Image (cartoon, helix red, strand yellow):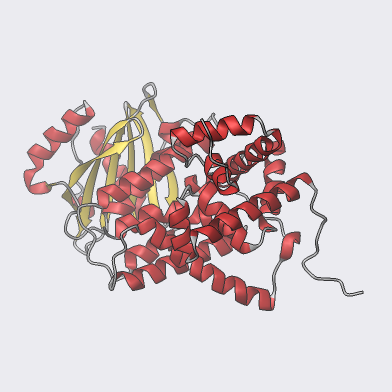
Amino acid sequence: MNTSPISEQELHAYADGRLDAGRRAEVEAWLHEHPQLRQAVAEWRLQGEALHRAFDPVLGEPVPARLTETVRISRRLPPLRLAAAVAWLAVGGVVGYAVRNYLPAAATPSSASLPRQAALAHAVFSPEVRHPVEVGAAEETHLVAWLSKRLGAELKPPRLSAQGFELVGGRLLPGEAGPVAQFMYQDARGQRLTLYVQRDAQDSRETAFRYARENGIGVFYWLDGRFGYALSGEMDKPDLLRIATAVYQQLNP
Amino acid sequence: MGRQDIVAEIPRLRRYARALTGDAVRADDLVQDTLERALGKWALWRPGNLRAWLFSIMHNLFVNQARSLRLVDYPGDAALPDLPTRATQSDALELRDFARSLARLPEEQREVLLLVALEDLSYEDTAKILDVPVGTVMSRLSRGRERLRALLSGDEPAETPLKVVK
């Protein structure tokens, strides 16, 4: 078969994997007889690999708050609606991927990423006006039954009325080790808190309260038996601690 | 399509901007400018291909900024590029060399190389983003790859950003 001459353009297309199978085979055969160009193509591919090695870690870095805020605060777009879950998946997926790949192996995924995942979920859903939760507090029985079933254990959202917060409702989220429940609370001024509950993939263990701050969101988190809990809110540490303590006491009567 | 779709593109915009500028702060400034510009235009026009549209906005901002930077103060290749890597030390050194060579490519070649080899965009999308014919994309890709190869292998004589007049 007579092969049409191979242009340099096609060599690049070959290196980039953009040729159809037939032409790819022709170029391959031709390169076999032109070792110098074969070497060049191999180097181009190595350049591409080096680009990914050098810059892919950026994908796993936490996105600076100023960037997400730029998008969130802009009034030029119609209100964010249901599809917020898509953003959550995208951001969570990227961060989850990063945590797996770029954190030292010693960090246990479930406890190390718990505050970050919780803060992300808080950041995505707490500003929501129309769809802050999937199931509202008015259907609390259904909410509790549903989330308990999905997490495979009995859940009960704590009452925080004494602290000035009422349950808004809850939603189910994808977590690193399976489904995660998020309960949302709101006070009279419209300030919101979220309680993030995940099944801990590790053996049962307990930890003290830990505190983290992620992009302006305070998170108290702890592991207790089979569950990891994280309480997130944009409030001062002492106030958040007071509420986290109340949550802990209700979960461990 | 909405806000959340734009938010989902931020990590890729940051990766491209970091590779393009070699500077973490400048890269995020570029991303922020891009987001602001995109949101401003959004009300008037919804792009068919959101990613390519965002990249084209970034390209225009980058070209304008690079032009004004050159007039004032350009760090040249003496500045170490910011690398996000947490790889082993020898790998990190190797990648730093790589990033420094990348920074020495002419901007138009660097842009094409990154859009094709890092962002995996088609030649056609790359041409649209840069607002040049596909043939130009191919010739810049070819020159960029050859130049980078020469820089990495040390064939390229070291250049100073300032021409020495004798």
Residue found 60% across the figure and 33% down from its top: A30
| Residue B18 in view (yes/no) | no
Q: Residue furthest right?
A: B166
- Left or right of A89 in this view: A62: right
Q: Does residue A233 lie above or below B72 as drawn?
A: above
Between residues A20 and A218, which one lies in front from this camera angle?
Answer: A20
Q: Residue furthest front?
A: A2
Residue found 68% across the figure and 50% down from its top: B146
Q: Residue furthest top?
A: A203
Between residues B46 and B136, which one lies in front from this camera angle?
Answer: B136
Residue A2's spot in the image, x, y percent? Answer: 53, 34
Displayed quadrant of residue B10: bottom left
- Left or right of A14 in this view: B163: right
Displayed quadrant of residue A29: top right
Residue A253's spot in the image, x, y percent? Answer: 23, 32
Residue B19's spot in the image, x, y percent? Answer: 58, 54
Q: Does residue A26 lie above or below A51 as drawn?
A: above
Q: Does residue B20 lie above or below A121 as drawn?
A: below
Residue found 54% across the figure and 45% down from its top: A10
| Figure disc tally | 0
- Left or right of B19 in this view: B31: left
Between residues B145 and B13, which one lies in front from this camera angle?
Answer: B145
Residue found 74% across the figure and 50% down from its top: B151
Residue B118's spot in the image, x, y percent? Answer: 53, 48
| Residue B146 in view (yes/no) | yes
Between residues B42 and A44, which one lies in front from this camera angle?
Answer: A44
Q: Does residue A132 lie above or below A60 as drawn?
A: below
